Image (spheres, rainbow, N blue to C red):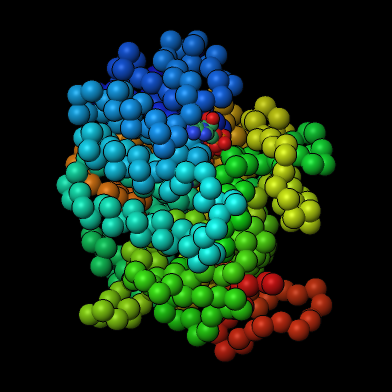
Amino acid sequence: MTMSYEVHARIDGPLVMIGFGSIGRGVLPLIERHIAFDRDAFTMIEPSGEFAGLLAERGLRHLQVALVPDNYVDVLTGLFPDGKGMLVNLSVDVDSIEVMLLCQKLGVQYIDTVVEPWPGFYFGSTLPNAERTNYPLREKVRALGRQFPGGPTAVSCCGANPGMISWLLKEALLRLAADTGVAAAPSSREAWARLSMELGVKGVHVAERDTQVSERARPPGVFVNTWSVDGLLSEGYQPAELGWGTHERRLPRDGHAFDFGAGYAIWIDRPGADTRVRSWCPGVGPQFGFVVTHNEALSIPDYYTVWDGDRPVYRPTCHYAYHPCADAILSLHEINGAGMLPEKKHILTEGEIVAGGDDLGVLLYGHAKGAMWYGSRLSCAEARELAPYQNATGMQVTSAVLAAIVWVAENPRAGFVEADEMDHARCLAVQRPYLGSIECHYTDWTPLDHRINRFAEDRDESDPWQFVNFLAD
Ligand code: NAD
């Protein structure tokens, strides 16, 4: 039986994608279902050719080339001759900021899921750790955006997280308002920030638990993950980084403020993939997560700051609390012990995964009802039924990219935006059919609860929601 799908938007002009990895392969069939585009004006730029057959069988053009500083201007300019079209960048190792700037010059709309630099930033860099964080990258994107108000829409960092998680946060705030009897109809950044303040939200974890397992045991020496291994390694070995709330009393050990920009974040002088926090997810309850740096840990505290002149009077703490799949935890443990990057890498496909799924949501804490998790709970089995070539993690990301494409097509000249600044209701309406169950869970858990035995630790008993209480090592 042939399914029919709602076509949400049309792309006028060439559609070019960069990267046909785990996310690119999942996004393509969603575009074919839900977006009207000219197939003759489609190009996939992908250097490895590993999945070229999938493009050939669809009759779609494949440009097998690696974009590098010397060729990206010529390659991309040649693909957008008429000052229109859309570029969806789902690659690693291609500098997002350079490509965003080029798109403004070419009159082309742009979407990516992460601010990616050219190779050399993440590993083997001579930069001090403070400059290998995402804060300067994001500040650069925002500064560039200010040069192009009303330019072709350029969406920075819109996958699941960063991306969808900002839309779920808005739904979560409205739900918390309804459940606590607070009237809420925010329609501006300032109003959303004031609502979060009024609700007493001290912090937001992007709380994720990936429970997907393969039927094959992970071979020693192979780094296994459910999405880009390169992506996880890159961000995991940047310093830990988090949005810094106004309720926080003291920096964690090795924590540092930034000395430029609006100062909404701090960084910790240790790798995010080796920095554990106590967090909470439905299904498992209390768990450890890693404070892997992410754009949403910066955009959310920036967006939700309430200002009195140039003084921030309210800002929530915000960071990723990521429990990757069990094979990735073992892989991280192995490479942290070895002190070496892996030679062999493998992304688990939907065919290899025999059980589990991905719970990805926001954990809002410190408000009248303690803590609340709100997010998507999707099993790999459900993802397999919903769309081809992706596991549960991929499905949450690719459907967010689809929502971004629709929003950009409907808002063609919005200039530079992040997910916080997009219409969350419209984007979630597009994405919701692919998210499994959207659930809300309240818990009376705090990071001061649950110890197997008591040992010396840095605790602040006067306020359970201080970051030092979450930090586990
Ligand atoms: P992947 O490693 O599976 O694929 C990366 C793709 O980039 C491959 O097709 C590779 O050939 C291509 N590539 C590498 N170098 C290139 C170059 N120089 N020029 C052109 N293409 C090049 O990665 P993935 O899992 O598909 O993830 C893609 C991106 O999405 C990564 O940057 C990742 O961090 C990001 N991501 C974001 C989210 C989110 O929620 N925001 C989630 C998952 C992944």
Q: Which image quarter: residue 182?
A: bottom left
Tag count: 0
Residue at the far bottom: name it.
462
On the image, the x and y values in percent for residue 273 come to 64, 57
Point 59% across, 29% down: residue: 384
In the picture, the quarter occupied by the C terminus is bottom right
The reply to whether residue 181 is in sight is no
Against 156, residue 182 (above or below) is: below
Q: Is residue 340 above or below residue 252?
A: above
The residue drawn where x is 49% and y is 56% is 294
Instruction: Please name whichever residue, 227 or 71, is drawn nearer the observer in this view of the structure.
Output: 71
271, above or below 48, in the image: below
In the rendered image, residue 46, in percent from the top left (x then y), is placed at 49, 25
Q: Is residue 183 left or right of residue 90?
A: left
Residue at 60 percent of width and 86 percent of height: 460
136 horizontally vs 290: left or right: left
Q: What percent of the width, then of the height, locates residue 70?
A: 40, 34
Residue furthest left as drawn: 150
Q: Which one is in front, 29 or 344?
A: 344
In this view, the residue in front, 146 or 120, is 120
Residue 68 located left or right of residue 272: left
Residue 143 image-quadrant placement: bottom left
Answer with left or right where residue 350 lies relative to residue 312: right
- Residue 416 visible: yes
The x, y position of residue 61, in whole percent, is 41, 15
Q: Is residue 261 above or below residue 383?
A: below
**What residue is drawn where x is 44% and y is 31%?**
67
